Image (spheres, grey):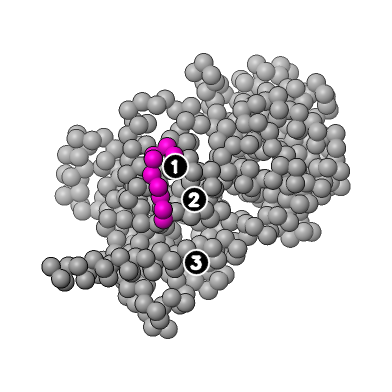
């Protein structure tokens, strides 16, 4: 195979006819690693993408912040590159950051990150070919990085702050607005964009008043679960509800508790298994509640009676068993782009009640692969949960279709093929744009 070398000294990237069907070499930024020790959805996405594109015969790399040296990597560590622990640029870098911090707080973090990521990517390119790099939009750091690379950077809309920050109840102060503006700038100048859901892409276009003509919707992938390993009505615990997510306003943990109080009136033998960290939930009056405090206020005696079990953060293997154990799984987010909590339940064929918010309706088809409730409405959530508790045949029917739909639409192989096709189109446009710029410069 003829290779086209890419390194930091090259200012063009030619995607010639001979390479249009060759295997690609794709880099991803992951905010944490390895996936076995992280509950971050972006990390899960990157790990699933690696599986998909490598299964199609392509090469992949991961750039990630430094992790504990004692961490055992189950993935190929040769393809995982950690950001340097020292600030790139040495003493000069320190001085630049110190001056910039006075002028604009937050800028040193973004520019320092871009320099560190650039150094890691150069390390990859010094020994291998790298065609394209993909990274989230958070903080607008990707804008700094794309200016430094001789290859196209794809911006992945994992969770723009104007959506996620608002859903979390974050105060919309100057810091909030600055982050939103920084992300807008990075998104506006992105050479290519992918979005997990149609909803997040449409809202980003509308909020920022940007056409984003080089953007496409490509869902997040998840490994298919073999039919014999999926949820079964005969094996689950009747009248058991599972909620997996943080206790905060964003993920709707408070709505789950409020709805469960109503469920108990109709189905008094029901249990709620609440798995996830307690981050504190901001109510409409601005008060911050913690999980057990909130439960005791809304359902006195439920903790002591074992009606609600607070399980804290659990490893992925435990969460799979928890979902199989429950008769109903809830996804209650006030907003979510394309949450893995919903995808994981779908993959396992679990009966699911999800919020009609963000990209969740693009994962769960109402009345086909699950039930949707009005986002933020605890009454409607309770009604949908009660419906499935009282109709186990319906729950089993929805769960079966959930598993089948997930395998057809969201398997790593299916999503990776969509991504590779888009990467090739992006490389073609990149090559044409660079060739056009080179010709214009030559004429001058």
Q: Which residue is mark 1?
A: 204
Farthest-out residue, left: 444
Residue 180 lies, in percent from the top left, at 37, 37
Please identify the quadrant where the N terminus is shown.
Answer: bottom left
Q: Quadrant of residue 310?
A: top right
Q: Residue 363 appears at what percent x and percent y?
A: 64, 47
First reached walking from the N terminus: tag 1 or tag 2: 2
Q: Residues within 10 Å of mark 1 (few under 14, many from 20)?
A: many
Q: CA distance from mark 3 to mark 1?
A: 23 Å
Q: Secondary structure at mark 1?
A: helix
Residue in view at x 60 percent, y 63 percent:
414
Q: Residue furthest bottom?
A: 1
* Magenta-drawn stretch, dominant element (helix, strand or loop): loop
Task: Name the residue tied to disc 3.
Answer: 421
Magenta segment: does it hold 208? Answer: yes
Q: Are marks 2 and 3 in contact (CB under 8 Å)?
A: no
Query: Which residue is disc 2 drawn over?
Result: 195
Q: Is residue 304 left or right of residue 377?
A: right
Of the two numbered discs 2 and 3 on the same chain, state the one appearing first in sequence. 2
Residue 155 sits above or below residue 307 on the image: below
In the foreground, 168 or 429: 429
Q: Judge from the rendering whether residue 16 lies leftward or rightward of residue 381; answer left or right.
A: left
Q: CA distance from mark 2 to mark 3?
A: 15 Å
Q: Nearer the viewer, residue 438 or 281?
A: 438
Task: Check if mark 1's residue and mark 2's residue have beta carbons within 8 Å.
Answer: yes
């Amino acid at each position: 195979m003829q290779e086209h070398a890419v390194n930091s000294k090259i200012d063009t990237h030619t995607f010639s006819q001979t390479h249009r069907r060759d295997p690609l070499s794709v880099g991803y930024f992951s905010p944490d690693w390895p996936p076995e020790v992280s509950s971050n959805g972006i990390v899960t996405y990157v790990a699933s993408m690696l599986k998909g594109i490598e299964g199609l015969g392509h090469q992949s790399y991961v750039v990630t912040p430094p992790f504990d040296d004692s961490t055992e990597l189950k993935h190929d560590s040769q393809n995982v590159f950690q950001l340097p622990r020292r600030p790139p640029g040495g003493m000069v870098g320190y001085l630049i950051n110190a001056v910039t911090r006075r002028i604009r707080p937050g800028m040193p973090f973004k520019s320092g990150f871009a320099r560190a990521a650039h150094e890691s990517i150069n390390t990859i390119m010094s020994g291998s070919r790298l065609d394209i790099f993909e990274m989230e939009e958070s903080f607008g750091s990707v804008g700094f990085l794309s200016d430094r690379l001789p290859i196209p950077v794809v911006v992945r809309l994992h969770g723009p702050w104007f959506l996620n920050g608002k859903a979390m109840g974050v105060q919309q102060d100057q810091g909030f607005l600055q982050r939103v503006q920084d992300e807008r700038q990075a998104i506006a100048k992105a050479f290519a964009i992918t979005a997990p859901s149609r909803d997040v892409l449409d809202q980003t276009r509308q909020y920022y008043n940007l056409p984003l003509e080089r953007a496409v919707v490509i869902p997040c992938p998840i490994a298919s679960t073999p039919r014999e390993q999926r949820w079964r009505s005969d094996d689950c615990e009747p009248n058991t509800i599972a909620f997996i997510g943080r206790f905060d306003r964003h993920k709707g943990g408070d709505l789950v508790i409020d709805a469960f109080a109503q469920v108990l009136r109709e189905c008094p033998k029901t249990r709620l298994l609440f798995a996830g960290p307690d981050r504190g939930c901001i109510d409409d009056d601005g008060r911050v509640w913690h999980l057990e405090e909130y439960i005791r206020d809304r359902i006195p005696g439920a903790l002591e009676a074992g009606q609600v079990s607070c399980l804290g953060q659990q490893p992925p293997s435990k969460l799979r068993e928890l979902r199989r154990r429950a008769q109903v799984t809830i996804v209650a987010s006030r907003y979510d782009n394309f949450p893995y909590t919903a995808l994981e339940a779908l993959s396992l064929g679990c009966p699911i009640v999800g919020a009609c918010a963000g990209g969740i309706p693009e994962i769960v088809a109402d009345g086909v692969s699950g039930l949707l409730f009005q986002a933020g409405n605890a009454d409607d959530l309770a009604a949908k949960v009660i419906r499935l508790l009282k109709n186990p045949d319906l729950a089993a029917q929805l769960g079966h279709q959930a598993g089948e739909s997930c395998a057809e639409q969201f398997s790593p192989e299916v999503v990776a093929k969509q991504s590779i096709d888009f990467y090739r189109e992006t490389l073609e446009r990149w090559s044409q744009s660079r060739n056009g710029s080179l010709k214009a410069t030559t004429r001058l």
